[in-house]
Structures are given as C-alpha cells and as structure tokens.
Image (cartoon, coloured by chain):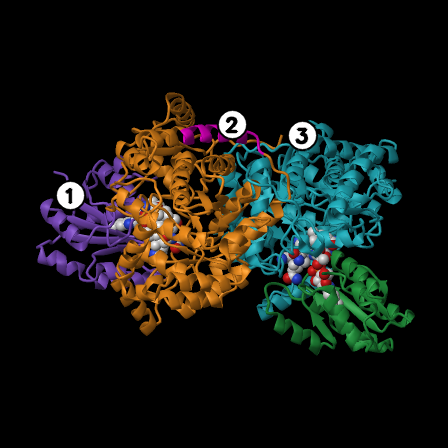
Chain colours: A orange, B cyan, C purple, D green
Amino acid sequence: MLADEPIPSEELRRIDAEIRAEWPTGDAVDFEEAIAYHGELPPEKRFAEVLESADRPLLQPRAGVPRLREQIELLEYLHGEGEADLLPTTIDSYTRDNEYGKARTGLEEARETGEDTLNGFPAVNHGVEGCRELIEAVDAPIEVRHGTPDARLLAAITFAGGFRSFEGGPISYNIPYTKEHDLAETIEHWQFVDRLAGAYTDRGVRINREPFGPLTGTLVPPSIAIAIGIVEGLLAATQGVRSITLGYGQVGNVVQDVAALRALRSLGEEYLPAEVTLTTVFHEWMGGFPPDEARANGVISLGGMTAAIAAPDKVITKSPQEFRGVPTKEANAAGLRTTRQVIDMAIEQRIEIDGIPEERALIERESRCLLDAIFDHGDGDVARGVVRAFESGALDVPFAPSDSARAAILPARDDDGRVRLFEFGELAMDQEIREIHAARLSKRAETEGREQSFRMVADDVDAISDGRLIGRPGGAIGGVGRAD
Amino acid sequence: MLADEPIPSEELRRIDAEIRAEWPTGDAVDFEEAIAYHGELPPEKRFAEVLESADRPLLQPRAGVPRLREQIELLEYLHGEGEADLLPTTIDSYTRDNEYGKARTGLEEARETGEDTLNGFPAVNHGVEGCRELIEAVDAPIEVRHGTPDARLLAAITFAGGFRSFEGGPISYNIPYTKEHDLAETIEHWQFVDRLAGAYTDRGVRINREPFGPLTGTLVPPSIAIAIGIVEGLLAATQGVRSITLGYGQVGNVVQDVAALRALRSLGEEYLPAEVTLTTVFHEWMGGFPPDEARANGVISLGGMTAAIAAPDKVITKSPQEFRGVPTKEANAAGLRTTRQVIDMAIEQRIEIDGIPEERALIERESRCLLDAIFDHGDGDVARGVVRAFESGALDVPFAPSDSARAAILPARDDDGRVRLFEFGELAMDQEIREIHAARLSKRAETEGREQSFRMVADDVDAISDGRLIGRPGGAIGGVGRAD
Amino acid sequence: MPKTVVLGVIGSDAHVVGITILEQAFSAAGFDVVNLGVQTSQEEFAEAAVAHDAEAVLVSSLYGHAEQDCRGFHDVLAAHGVDAVTYIGGNLAVGQDEFARTRETFEAMGFDRVFDSETDPTEAIAALERDLRIATVEPERATVRS
Amino acid sequence: MPKTVVLGVIGSDAHVVGITILEQAFSAAGFDVVNLGVQTSQEEFAEAAVAHDAEAVLVSSLYGHAEQDCRGFHDVLAAHGVDAVTYIGGNLAVGQDEFARTRETFEAMGFDRVFDSETDPTEAIAALERDLRIATVEPERATVRS
Ligand code: B12
Ligand code: B12
C-alpha cells in the first residue's frame, strides 16, 4: 500500500534493475561507478552547493534541443552571453511520456535533417555517456527539467550521467502535465526517484530536488502551490533527499508574490525536517505571454522586480519569445540579462511594501488548512493523504487537466490583482477564508458592474497577454492613484 | 534690468518683429491668423487638454528626423505601433544653436542623400507651413522638444505652426545644454517664449509649457531638479502660461523617485499660482544606458514600475537603443510598449513602500532651502534670484557644462542607492541636511571600505550601464535581503 | 438544432487552458461542444466525431509536436467515415517559425483551416459559422471576447 | 616630465560627463590634462594644443554631429603647426550605424585612433602610452576602472 516510507534498499535495487531493463541505454548505469564519477566533478558543477551558497538570486533559463552538440552550444551560449548562473536541460515530450522509441525517431530525424522536431533533449536516448559529455563540456551546474510522471529511467540515467539537480514531483509533474496517470502510482514512481537521489546523497553526492511550483501556471492561488510543494518536499525528504528547492510561479501582484515567497520559505522550514537544506525558486510569469516581445520584456521585468524584493535563491527566467514558441538562444539570453539588470538595480534598495505581512498571514493560514486536510485525509500519512485529498476535492488545482484532480475550483483576480477563488468546490479552506475571498471578489465585481462568472476567469486568463493584470470588461484599467 | 515681470505688449510685438526678421521663414508668422488656425484644430490635438484630462500616465517618446515626410511617418509609427499617447518633435542641434544656415545645409543634404545627417527636425527651416503639415498629418498632440537657450524664433514658428506644447526653460535649457550662454540673457529670451505662449493662452489657445526636469541627467539630487522646475514654472506663469508640466528624471531608487514625484507635485501646487493647471512628467533614466538592449529593457522597466507607483501625468520613455544612438522607430516603439505593459500591470496594484514620506519630507525641506535662497538672492525677485544663486553657488547642478553654474557639487549614491551629495560647495542647504547626506554616504563608504572620492562618483556614473545601481568597487552587489 | 463540435488537444500535449476557453466560447455561441480534454489520440477524436455526429472537429496543439501528432489524422477520420470540417489551432511548430509556412504544412495535411495562437475564439466561431453556412446565433452572445 | 593632452567636446555638443571621467582618468594615469570643456571649436583645440605644447589632442563627440564638426579639423591643426597624436571618441554617428564604418570615416579624416562609446578610459590610456612610447606610470593608479 502507498505510504510515505523510505523504499528499502533491496526494493530500490529491484526496481532499479527493472526500469533499467526498459530501454537499452539503461544498461550503462552503474551506481558505484557513478558515485566515483560525481566525486571527480569540480565544485562549480555541484548544483546544490552552488545554489545553497549563493549570495544573490541565481538565474536559470529553460532550454533543451534534441542534439547533443547543439545542446552544448546552447548551454554555453546561455552561460556566456546570457550570464546564466545555473543551466537547464529541458527534456522532450516523448521522453516525458516514456515513449523512448518515438524520441529516438525524433532524434534521428533531427540528426538527419538538421531540424529540431523534438521539443527538448531526449536524455534517455543520449544515455549516460551523452549526458556526461554535456556535463563535462559546460562549466556550470545543470538541472534536468521535464514534466515526466514516471521519471525513473530518466533519473537513473541522468544521475549517473552527472546531473545533480532534478525538477519535478509526483503531484507537480502529474496534475498539470497529464490526463490519465494515476496519482498514487505516480507517487510511487517518484519515491523511487527520490530514493535514488537519497542514495547518491548518502554517498556524499547531494542531488538537489525541485518540486515544480507553478503547476498549471494559470491563476494558481499561492497557498495551493505552497501546500503541494511542501508535500513533495516531505515525500522527498523521507527518501533521503537533503537539498530541496521549493518553487512558486509569479501571479503578477507584487504584494501577493512577495508574501507567497516569504510564506513558502517559512512554512518550508517549519514543515521540512531539519536535515534538509531548503532553498526557494521563483518562476517568472508562467501563464500566457503577450504576443509582442517588447511587452513580454515588461512582463519579465515585473518578475525581476518581484525577485529583487523577495530575494529567492533562484529565479527561472522567461524569454521575450515565450508567446510564440521555443525561443532562439539570443532571446533566451536576453530574458536572462533583462532580469539580471532589474534585479541588480533593485536588490540593494530597501523596498518594503505595505500589506505584505497581512497577505502572507492569509497565505500561511490557507496553506495550513490544506496541509491539515492532507494529513487528516491520510491519517497522518502524507502520501495517502494527498491522493485522497485530491479525490475528495479537499485539494485541487485550477485548470488541472489530470483525471486525478477535480479542477472544480475557479480563480479570479480581486480589485488589486491578487488571485482569489470564487468557486471553492470542496477545497479544504475554512469559512472565514472563503468569506475573505468572496468579499475581495465582490468588490471587484462591483467596480466592474458585472457578476462573477467564467467570463471573468477567461478575461483574467487573457489579461497579461492583452497588456494588463486584471481582465476588466472592455480592457479598461481600473482606479489609478496619483502622485500625491 | 532683469525682473520677473510680464513683458509689456508693445515690447512683445517689438521683439517678435525683430526675431522674425532673423531668418526668412520668420515672415510667415501671423499671430491673428495663427489663433484662427489653432481654433480649427480638433480636440485630440490640443496638448494641454489631452494631458490634463488623462486618467492614467500618458506615454511620450523622443523623436525627430530632418525631413518632413519621414518625421510624419515616424510619428505615425510611434502613435500606431508604439501606442504613444503624446508625440514629440525633437529639434536638431544646429537649430538649437540658432545656426539656421547650418541646419538648412543639413536638411538639404538629408533631402539629397537620403541620409539623416541632422540629429533632429529643423523646425525653423521647415517654417510655419511645414509644421502645419506635420500637425495636420498626425492624429495626436505634438510637443516641441529641443534644448535651445534662445528659442524665440523656434517658438514663434512652431506656435504659429500648430504645436501646442513646448519643452524647456531658461535654466534647464541653459545649464545642461550650453557652455557660454549668459543665464540672465537666457531668462529674458524665455520670458519672450513664455509671454508668447501666454498671448496664445489669453486668446483661448492654451499652450502647454514643460521645464526640462532631468537637467544633466546624471545623479541630480531631486531637490535641485524640483527647485529649478518651480522657478521656471513661476517665470512662465508670470508671462501668462496656464498649463505647466513639471518634470523629473528617474534616479533609479524607487523610494527616492516616488518621493520626488510626490514632492514635485505638492510643492508645485504650493508655489505656482492657482490659475496654473499643474501636471507632472517622469523621465525614464536619463543617464548612461547599458550597451545591451536586453539590459536596457530592464532599465526602462524599472522606470515603468516607478511610474506605476507614483502615477505622474506623463512618462517620457527611453528606447533599448539609447546607448548607441538615435533609435530606430521599431526600438523607440518597443520602449513605449515595454513601459506601457509594466505600468498597466502594476498601476492597479496598491504598492505603498515604506520610507517614502520620510524621503519626501527630506526632499521638500531641501527644495525649500534652495527656493528660499533663490528668493533671498533676488530680494524677492525670482529671475534675479536664480541668476545670483547660480553665481554664488547657492544653486548648482552636478556636471553642469555651463559657465553660469559652478558645477562644484559632487553627488554619489548612498548604501541604498539614493542620490546624495558629498561635496556641497556653496549650495544653500542647511547644516542638518548636510549631516544627513554625510551620514548616509559614510555608511556606504564603510560598506565598501573606501573613502568618498571622485572615484566613487565615476563608479556611480557608470553603474547602471555596467548593470547595477550603485558603483561598488569591483562591481560587487551589496547586502541582499532574503525572502524571510 | 445546435451543431455539434468535437474539441480536444492532440497527442501527449497537456495544455488545457486554451481549450477550456474555446469550450466556453463555442458553447456561448450556441454550439454543442464535446470536449475530449488534453492528450487525446487520433482514434479518440474519430470515435467521438462518429458518436456525436459532429459537424466539426477542432484540434488544439500547443507544445510543438503537432506535425508528428497529426500525421495520418485525416486517414483515421476517413477510415471512421468522418466527413466533418477540421480545424487546427495553437502553437503548431517548434520554435519561432513563420506562420505562413506552418499553415501550408497543416493545410497540406488536410485541415480546412489553420489558426495561430493569436486567434481570438470569435474568429474561429465566425469561420465555422461560415463554413457550416449558419447564421450567427444571437450576435451579442457570439462576441464572447470584446 | 608628464605629457600634456588637450581634451574637449567639439562643435555645439554639450555632453560633459564623458570628458569629466576622461579628465580624471588621464590625470590619474599621470598625464597633464588641459580640459577645454564642451562646445569647443576647432580653433580652440588648435590654440590650446599650441599653447600647452600638447602631445595629444583628444576629441569627444556624443551628439551625432561629429562628422560635420570635424570636417577640416586636421587642416586647422596643421595650419597652427600642431603635430600631436589625435584621437576621437564617443557616439560618432547619428543612429544605429556599424562602428566599423564610422571608424573608417574618421580615420580617413586624419584621426590616429577612433573609439566607440563602450571604450573604457584605460583602453585609451594604454593606446596613448603606446603611441607616445611611454611606460605605464604606476600601474595600479593607471587602472582607474577595474
Ligand atoms: C501555461 C503553459 C504551460 C503550462 C500548461 C498547464 C496546462 N496543463 O494547461 C505548463 C507549465 C504545465 C506547460 C508545460 C509545457 N509547455 Co507550455 N506553455 C504555457 C504557456 C505559457 C501559456 C499557454 C496558455 O495557457 N495560454 C493561454 C491560453 C488561453 O491560450 P492558448 O493556449 O494559446 O489557446 C488559445 C489559442 O492558441 C487558440 N487555440 C488553441 N488551440 C486552438 C484550436 C483551434 C481549432 C482554434 C481555432 C484555436 C485554438 O485559442 C485559445 C484560446 O484563446 C505557453 C506560452 C504562451 N502562450 O505564452 C507555453 C508553451 C505553449 N509551452 C511550451 C512547451 C514547450 C511546454 C512543455 C513541452 C515544456 C516544458 N517547459 O515543460 C510542457 C508540455 C507538457 C505537456 N505534456 O503538454 C511551448 C510550446 C513550444 C512550441 N510550440 O514551439 C510554449 C509556447 C512556451 C515556449 N515559448 O516555449 N506549459
Ligand atoms: C546624459 C545624456 C544627455 C544629457 C547631457 C548632460 C550633459 N551636459 O552632459 C542631456 C539630457 C542634456 C543630453 C542632451 C542631448 N543629447 Co544626450 N545623452 C545622454 C546619455 C543618456 C548619456 C551620456 C553620458 O553622460 N554617458 C556617461 C559617460 C560617462 O559616457 P560617454 O559620454 O559615452 O563617454 C565615455 C565614452 O563614450 C568614451 N569617450 C567619450 N568621448 C571620448 C573621446 C575619446 C578620445 C575617447 C578615447 C573616449 C571617449 O569615454 C567616456 C568615459 O567613459 C546618452 C546615451 C547613453 N550613452 O546612454 C545620450 C546621447 C549621447 N544624447 C544624444 C542626443 C541626440 C542628445 C541631444 C542632441 C538631443 C536631446 N535629446 O536633447 C541633446 C544634445 C544637446 C547638446 N547640445 O549637446 C544621443 C546621440 C545620438 C547619436 N550620436 O546618434 C544619445 C546617444 C542618446 C540617443 N540614443 O539618442 N543628453
């Protein structure tokens, strides 16, 4: 039965052997040899160590192309011209679906035609050797970023291949990323990933793990992201992971975003065991971008400004080409430098905004409601609890495509642009919280002279890509202050 | 003798005739005919009215090319693709120097070769007719922006040509823009410009006047900009101007910038006569830009963010190509849209930052010191006072190239990035203010373990173009907060 | 009688927000919408079109694998006897491709219309109404985005 | 004996910040700097070079009219008998021109070296030391920007 307990060593070995047999490249994985390999890696390629000792927010882009040589060039470019502190390797969608055959075809096509028909780097097909070539070629820590519900083989190969950070988690890489994967099963799959990371950690190779905070990237109330991040952190810690980066995706309201990042850190420190070194990551706006690079730069900069105020340990940047498709390396590097400029200009300033403690208190209270409900649902077992909480709707994510979530809650922005819920479904939030949200949203409805409805949600979904934060009817901008 | 008194009508007519005789295109100016012409202009081209009735910060770029057709296309592009609310016509440097002959040669060269060898629009040479063609072709209000110490002929021609807003003033277009022009004489020249604007105003054609707030654009302490803006506003009001836009150039510290814009508005309202309708304009960073468009977008966005918080009536935008040279129209429009996106995403948010009232109080106190000194120096006459205050050094501007200013004061950023003075020279600021500045700056010197020196000033001059706000030794970034 | 449209995201793509908005917009415009959700296979599209006797099949793809995911799609539809109008929309190519080229590719594959991700739902609705030769139902409701 | 350089902004250009920084940097590097300030005419440059027996004339221009302002400059210098090294730097063309083209233009006009506005003062100092064949005076002071 699913339980939040460490996978026993023999079991770990058994699964490891099993999943490595799934695809020819699994063969090359040898744990002892991999530990030795990692031991040789220079300090500047040790992800956890670099991240945890940073004295300013480190920047990391997203980037992955099918071919190895091109991936090396891309990462070198982002490190050099983009001044990225940390690098990514984003995995293609077929590999995420465990469709290694299709990924191989795509890789072969890419090699033959020179066109990138895969949307990422098929690490499983590149195998241990390919991964190591990448790690050795590039002078910065590199993380595996993907969206894979069953990432066991990917983890086995990339860990052995020298990667020392791995994004994702059973909830955050299921609920927003798939339709039919069973949540309980996904948790078991990730327990393996975490146990493997734990095994490396036990041997001195601290593998950093990063739950994917933004979820669907679309009007996710902060407390939901925080509760899920903490659950994934707990599950990982149980399996021996000691370096955890909790994430959060910008909603665009500066007060709410700064409050959320502070709540994320303090709740993370409270809930996660003391052995874990906690860091935080802030994702620049993950929802729909404006179809205009100039406007996209404004969105990116608002993220940089927020990061300067909240000072997370890491910022995942967007590119001005986010709207259209996978960015050119130049655009990706531009997003990094725009962010760097804003952060470095603003971070030395004391910018303390009114209302952050209040918003943070609300977020913490909401998060505790959700976490309590999860523990209750599992009679104290967080693994079982989270599955049942999603089943009952006590836990939910807006716009979740997964059958494991109800997707019954509806978010909308209040008159100040903060994300609230106007449809709570069965979400485990107490009456007072619901009333606070309702009051804020009815103030907005009043301002706009219309009812709360799906129409408002749809308007809010489009608002930032249409050039504003709140989806007012007719595209209006609401009450504006004056300089006095 | 120079005095802050309205130019009598006959005197106005005499000078008018005289200056119109200076260059052939002066002939075509006919005041009565011009009043009639303005009467026909549709409401959306009336600068003061559009600006004063705006319900959100209006955006205006800088732009001027030599040829008429190209200028029309440029402005239409900035209005259409750039979504500019207000448009500029930036005048070339020869016209600013009253070198109309050289400007004509440049214009002819531009017409022959198709290359723009002038850095702006030579309005005097285009004459009343050329200006009107421009005004008629473009569907938005257009302002004359220049930098001309003696702008009398330029004003006569552009006012008659249908322009309804005119930047500059006797101090702000002398001290930062020239070396040898006598300040008292410049004031007399601008009294004529203002009196002419007043004459139009008397006849129902309210010409908007906008002192150039940023001065040298380089580490100018807010109070100096405010005091000078108010003096220019007072001089203009005396001559009958009724629509005045006081300006301020971003220093990059958000608290100081917001405080300064609030102080500018409240002091402006206090000092200017009640008949004047006051508006404010915020200039995005006027100092040296980063030699990288991506980073420049970050600088621009920090300006947008500041504008969203302070909500001035107008924002003058920069382009990502500011560093290199006169921007392409695409880059100019991009700067507008980046700014628009940031403002519109942030302006509906309540963002009230700690410390603004305190900084504002300091700025107001400093400004009053300067204004008191100016009035004292002139025995109550602001025109004479300002000349003498510059002579004595009681009033001064950092990096002023003009012989009329001492340029003896030296600014540097404090540990929070606010602009302070470490060399006051004879500047009329009381002892307590000097001590406040000294204390802030010695805190920074301590942080950096070095003495205050010109080296620190030079580092601060380069800091933003080098990617940060404060010019720390070795390019370091100072103490960074955390998310908790 | 309202016309039925089948809507879904093809392949292993999980971008759901777009079709959620489209579902609401097409419903508001008077269509019966069968929303198959994300990660829908070619067969599922075909079967749903048959089962609901759909007049149009609307395929969405955002993640950049549309071309591979749609190979043979119109053969599968034909094999199931589906003769509906077919539209595809979203982010149809990996990277910063020219849309004109992308449109050609997908038209060549058999789609009646190809939309980019700047498409406002009203445009797709208007096109479908033309293609199905029906008049706008209650014009003020049809304009779901202003 | 310290070498003398004449520095100024030519034409009607008033951008003073750059030469203020340059003045300080060249002084710190051990040069005697005669700073003529902004809006300096060709004759003023030539006269100052003669008066101070300057080894180098450093012309700055930011506002985009450098080409017009410098026409005949080297003839004026020659007419005054000035045989100094001549440098020009700043933003030398209107608009977003290629710097390579700009450099050619000004070299053709007679300038020994042409610098763009990304130039760090240390580069100009190093170049001048080479051109005047003098060793670096106190290396740690010469590096005025780190
Ligand atoms: C939110 C988002 C996500 C969320 C999705 C959550 C969810 N389950 O829905 C998350 C974070 C999970 C995600 C994941 C991924 N994403 Co994503 N994502 C986005 C993003 C930022 C916004 C999409 C969105 O919701 N827009 C708002 C809705 C309302 O607009 P829309 O989806 O475009 O739909 C409208 C139109 O396109 C049109 N339309 C759409 N379909 C159809 C069909 C028809 C017939 C018609 C007429 C019209 C039409 O009408 C819709 C309504 O207005 C876009 C970039 C962007 N657009 O800004 C990237 C983007 C689509 N994602 C991308 C990628 C690559 C991925 C990943 C593969 C990689 C990764 N980083 O993990 C994974 C894929 C996972 C998977 N299996 O699908 C790329 C696609 C690249 C390409 N095509 O070249 C994009 C463009 C980002 C980028 N620049 O790289 N993503
Ligand atoms: C501040 C500024 C102003 C201030 C100047 C205040 C003052 N009196 O100094 C104000 C606002 C008054 C101003 C006015 C104008 N400006 Co202006 N200004 C700038 C800005 C933003 C920064 C310049 C600066 O101080 N940089 C910091 C210093 C330290 O760097 P620097 O000047 O580049 O100098 C360094 C190097 O270039 C190099 N260098 C310079 N000269 C030399 C010489 C030699 C021999 C060597 C080796 C090296 C060297 O070393 C210096 C020290 O590191 C620049 C754009 C930018 N760079 O970001 C525009 C810019 C120079 N200005 C420009 C223009 C057009 C004008 C105006 C004509 C138009 C207007 N808007 O009013 C007027 C001109 C007025 C006049 N008569 O000169 C243009 C020039 C366009 C072009 N060349 O294509 C620029 C590039 C802006 C733009 N993108 O349009 N400006």
Camera-nearest residue between B9 and B94: B94
Residue ID for mark 3: B357
Q: Is any atom of residue D131 visible in this view?
A: yes
Residue ID for mark 2: A358
Q: Which mark is residue C4?
A: 1
Percent x, y of residue B281: 63, 40
Is residue A357 located in the magenta-colored stretch of the structure?
Answer: yes
Task: Tell me which corner region of the image, top left, top right, bottom left or bottom right, holds residue A285.
Answer: top left
Placement of A328 over or under A189, stated as above or below: below
- Subunit ID for the residue under disc 3: B
Q: Is any atom of residue B74 visible in this view?
A: no
Residue at left offset 32%, top offset 39%: A383
Percent x, y of residue C75: 13, 61
- Subunit ID for the residue under disc 2: A
Q: CA distance from mark 2 to mark 3?
A: 21 Å
Q: Secondary structure at mark 1?
A: strand
Three-letter amino acid code at disc 2? Answer: Glu
Q: Secondary structure at mark 2?
A: helix
Q: CA distance from mark 1 to mark 2?
A: 49 Å
Camera-nearest residue between A424 and A264: A264
Percent x, y of residue A421: 37, 30
Q: Which residues are magenta?
A: A353-368
